Image (cartoon, helix red, strand yellow):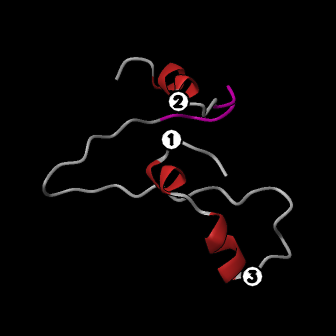
Amino acid sequence: MREPRVLLAEMGCPIPDDVEVRVWNSSAEIRYLVLPMRPDGTDDLDEEELAALVTRDSMIGVARL
């Protein structure tokens, strides 16, 4: 992927310039997991409430919470 930042923006997930973007390919032997960043203003939420915010797209790295 030559321009991941452009692709993500086209998918509705613009990434700020100060965020590093790395692209890794999965294989049969290796899988990568994206851990979504904690959304601003959620310091008072417990684990269950935070889990309810997580989407499939945020777990594969094409959406931000």
Task: Look at the numbered discs 2 and 1 and tell me whether their residues touch, using CB distance below 8 Å.
Answer: yes
Which residue is at 62% across, 73% downward? 51
Task: Look at the numbered discs 3 and 2 and tell me whether their residues touch, using CB distance below 8 Å.
Answer: no
Which residue is at 67% across, 25% downward? 17
- Residue range of the region highlighted in magenta in the rendering: 15-21
Q: Eyeballing the image, is 48 above or below 23?
A: below
Residue on which the image places disc 2: 11
Q: Which mark is residue 41?
A: none
Q: In which quarter of the image is the N terminus?
A: top left
Q: How far apart are marks 1 and 3 (CA)?
A: 24 Å
Under circle 1, the secondary element is loop
Residue 7 x %, y %: 48, 23
Q: Eyeballing the image, is 19 above or below 60?
A: above
Q: For label 1, count other residues whose C-alpha is less than 10 Å away and answer few (under 14), some (14-19) or many (20+).
A: some
Which residue is at 50% across, 49% downward? 57
Q: For label 2, count other residues whose C-alpha is less than 10 Å away and answer few (under 14), some (14-19) or many (20+).
A: few
Which residue is at 52% across, 29% downward? 11
Residue on which the image places disc 1: 62
Under circle 2, the secondary element is loop
Q: Residue 46 carries which label?
A: 3
What is the three-letter code of the residue carrying label 1? Answer: Val
Q: For label 3, count other residues whose C-alpha is less than 10 Å away and answer few (under 14), some (14-19) or many (20+).
A: few
What is the three-letter code of the residue carrying label 3? Answer: Asp
Q: What is the number of callouts on the image? A: 3
Residue 31 x %, y %: 27, 57
Q: Distance between the residues labelled 3 and 2?
A: 30 Å
Residue 39 x %, y %: 75, 57
Under circle 3, the secondary element is loop
Q: Is residue 25 left or right of residue 57?
A: left
Q: Is residue 32 left or right of residue 29?
A: right
37 or 60, nearer to the observer = 60
